[in-house]
Image: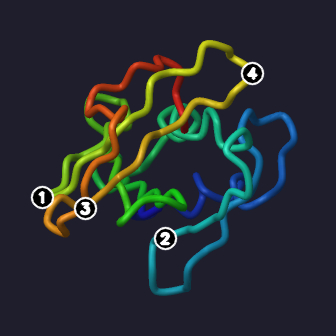
Amino acid sequence: MLAMYADEVMEPLTQWDESRSWKGKFDKLGLAVDGWGMEFNRQNTRSGLLKHLESLPWPKPESVQVLIHDEEDDCFGLWMLHDGALVEVGLPRVQRYHRRAPDLDEFSPSPGYLWRTDTGVVVPAGLSTERSDPRPAW
């Protein structure tokens, strides 16, 4: 994730905190970059991340960019703050596809698959561009 002048806001997120709905911690990307990264090992450990990030007092909210790459994605998805909410920003020649929502809540919500549309990939049957699971995957 990238956010200008956000060292103070991000500091607590660089520490483990079991009280958060998402599990993990961010690591600073470098001294010259206003960026932090983390990796999730399981889907169920990431739920609530975007809501948490939305709630923080960003010094320059217009600079907040969250880049997320799921293991089956072709590229990173981009979320930016719009009117206080992190919203996925559409990218050229890229489409997110979703499976039908699971019948049981015991399964983690899926963010779908972010695939390039200019590579000739055939979209498997049963996938749709419409999201049917209202639970946030991130």
Q: Position of residue 72 (x, y in %)?
A: 48, 59
Q: Work out whether mark 3 precedes mark 2 in sequence or the reverse, and give the earlier one.
A: 2
Residue topped by disc 1:
92
| Amino acid type of the residue tagged 1 in the rendering | Pro
Image height check: is 42 above or below 103?
A: below
Marks 1, 3: nearer the viewer? 3
Dot 1 falls on a residue whose secondary structure is loop
Quick one: which residue is furthest to the front in this view?
125
Dot 1 and dot 2 residues touching (CB under 8 Å): no
- Which is more foreground, mark 4 or mark 1? 4
- Marks 4/2: CA–CA distance: 34 Å
Q: How is the image coloured?
A: rainbow
Foreground: disc 4 or disc 2:
4
Specify which label sits upstream in the sequence, 1 or 3: 1
Q: For the residue carrying disc 4, how many other residues have a C-alpha within 10 Å: few (<14), some (14-19), or many (20+)?
A: few
Q: CA distance from mark 3 to mark 2?
A: 32 Å
Judge left or right: residue 98 versus residue 24. Answer: left
SS at mark 3?
loop
First-in-chain label (3 vs 4): 4
Instruction: Look at 37% across and 32% down and name the residue there.
Output: 126
Q: What residue is disc 4 on?
A: 106
